[in-house]
Image: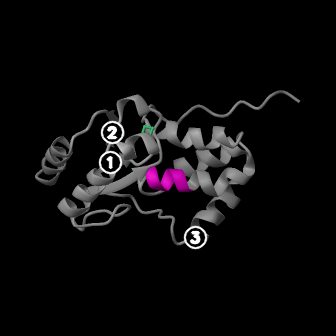
Amino acid sequence: MPAFTPPPLPSDDKRWKIVNGTMRKNGFARYALIETLHTVQSAFGYLDDDSIRFVARSLRVPLSQAYGVVTFYHYFSLKPPGKHTMTICTGTACYIKGTDKLVAAAEKRLAIPQGQTTADGKISLMTARCVGACGRAPVVLTDGELVGQMTGEQMLEQLERWAVE
Ligand code: FES
């Protein structure tokens, strides 16, 4: 049987690399379905048709099964997140460089817990477990753009800019 070649990433948004990393770590095995959907949810804040299709195709599970999982667990959301997304890496390297404090500061500024979107729909606050740029810790993704050596001040400035748009 020819070796399986996973489909290309849907776009060059860095968050797909995180999703792909979860699947690769599991050898693109079907049992990685829930964990992978979890990664999509935590990186993007929700799952849309494209992301569900991409995961299903990559893991070779029927689309109906992937949708079945997404609709069964309340944790998963099919609703689009805010206009902007701040994804803070909480992997080990970033954590020891203080991203827990970034998460706390963002939660305070936005008055929402991580994983949620502000009531005005402007900003979603997400976390990810290692985005593969540990050498640049602490790392955040602002709308999928990787920013290394992020300070609390810079992050709050970015949130401010988005909030007044
Ligand atoms: S732990 Fe943050 S990039 Fe690896």
From the top left corner, tell me how far across and down residue 71 is, in percent.
Answer: 58, 68
- Looking at the image, which residue is at 67% across and 34% down? 6
Residue 96 coordinates in the image, percent (x, y): 37, 44
Which residue is identified by label 3? 73
* Amino acid type of the residue that numbered disc 2 sits on in the rendered structure: Pro
Residue 1 seen in the current view: yes
* Label 2 CB less than 8 angstroms from ligand 1: yes
Residue tagged 1: 99
> Of discs 3 and 1, which sits in the foreground?
1
**Magenta highlight on residue 78:** no
Secondary structure, mark 1, is helix
Image point 28% across, 34% down: which residue? 149
- Residue identified by numbered label 2: 138
**Label 3 sits on what residue type?**
Tyr
Quarter location, residue 65: bottom right
For the view shown, which residue lies furthest in the right direction? 1
Q: Residues within 10 Å of mark 3 (few under 14, many from 20)?
A: few
| Magenta region | 38-43
Instruction: Give the SS element for disc 2.
Output: loop
Q: Give residue 152's mark.
A: none
Residue type of the residue flagged with mark 1: Thr
> Which mark is in front, 3 or 2?
2
- Name the N-terminal-most of marks 2 and 1: 1
Which percent across, then down, holds residue 42? 46, 54
